[in-house]
Amino acid sequence: MKAFFVALAIFATPFVAAHYTFPDFIVGSTVSSDWEYIRETANHYSNAPVTDVTSPEFRCYELDLENTPGETGTVTVSAGSTVGFKGNSAIYHPGYLDVMMSEASPAANSPEAGTAQTWFKVYEQTPTFANGQLTFPSTSQTQFTFTIPQSLPSGQYLVRAEQIALHVASTFGGAQFYIGCAQINVVDGGSGNPSPLVSIPGVYTGYEPGILINIYNLPANFTGYQAPGPAIWQG
């Protein structure tokens, strides 16, 4: 019996290690400490993903929906500057990665922020399709950066990183979502009008071709990966 449990532990270890969180926020060349500006997630120990796209936890996966926002700092960044997320390990699972932002009312550290139809996409990494196979650029990255749109109006925002792992996404509910929400205050902004706006949850049904997909057995008429969610706002 002891040998069975040892074998089980050895078998399970790679799957646990392959999960991840995004605890650190990057501003320029500076990396924050864990959960300094990113709301601590409920999976901060387990690294387990979210799979229910209809759950309130799908928004930011906070440890505590009411109290975690107020316990998290808000960092000031300039419009047009480079920011990003750093994981607690490499992004091992093949998938799609994107970043959405939401104007935060009444403030970035309030539980009400981001609960309406206020989210817009600013960045994505999509799989490429060639020679009958998908290639996933996000795999093995430990961090990624992107640019805050120059024309984004000044104010407080939530910044939501999302990696959709697709290695077991061939059945409904199989896609794994790894999420982190940073709290920021944008200065030196412009007069842009972010769009299209979506709600989270609400942005996905789980049946989108980019979420419900067998990446190891693509259909004969497959022409390329369809990114789920809204188009990117270029600012």
Image (cartoon, rainbow, N blue to C red):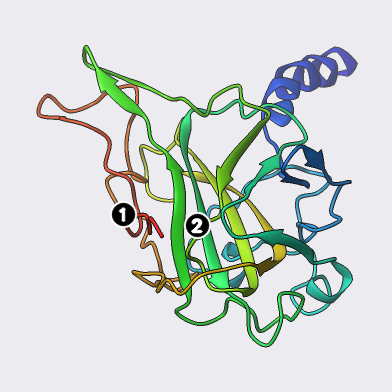
| 3D distance between C-alphas at marks 1 and 2 | 30 Å
67 lies above or below 235? below
The image shows residue 141 at horizontal and vertical percentages of: 62, 26
Q: Name the amino acid, label 2.
A: Pro
26 or 96, which is in the foreground?
Answer: 26
The image shows residue 90 at horizontal and vertical percentages of: 68, 26
Q: In this view, does 149 lie to the left or right of 66?
A: left
Q: Is residue 222 left or right of residue 133?
A: left
Q: In this view, does 29 lie to the left or right of 216?
A: right
64 lies above or below 8? below
Dot 2: what SS? loop
Q: Residues within 10 Å of mark 1 (few under 14, many from 20)?
A: few
145 or 9, which is in the foreground?
Answer: 145
Q: Where's the C terminus, which quadrant?
A: bottom left
Residue at (72%, 37%) from the top-left corner?
A: 87
Q: Name the amino acid, label 1.
A: Tyr
Quarter-of-image position of residue 193: bottom left
The image shows residue 37 at horizontal and vertical percentages of: 80, 58
Dot 1: what SS? loop
Which residue in the protein does label 2 denote?
149
The image shows residue 224 at horizontal and vertical percentages of: 22, 32
Of labels 1 and 2, the one closer to you: 2
Instruction: Kindly identify which numbered label has been placed on residue 207.
Output: 1
Q: Which of marks 1 and 2 is nearer the N terminus?
A: 2
222 lies above or below 84? above
Q: Where's the N terminus, which quadrant?
A: top right
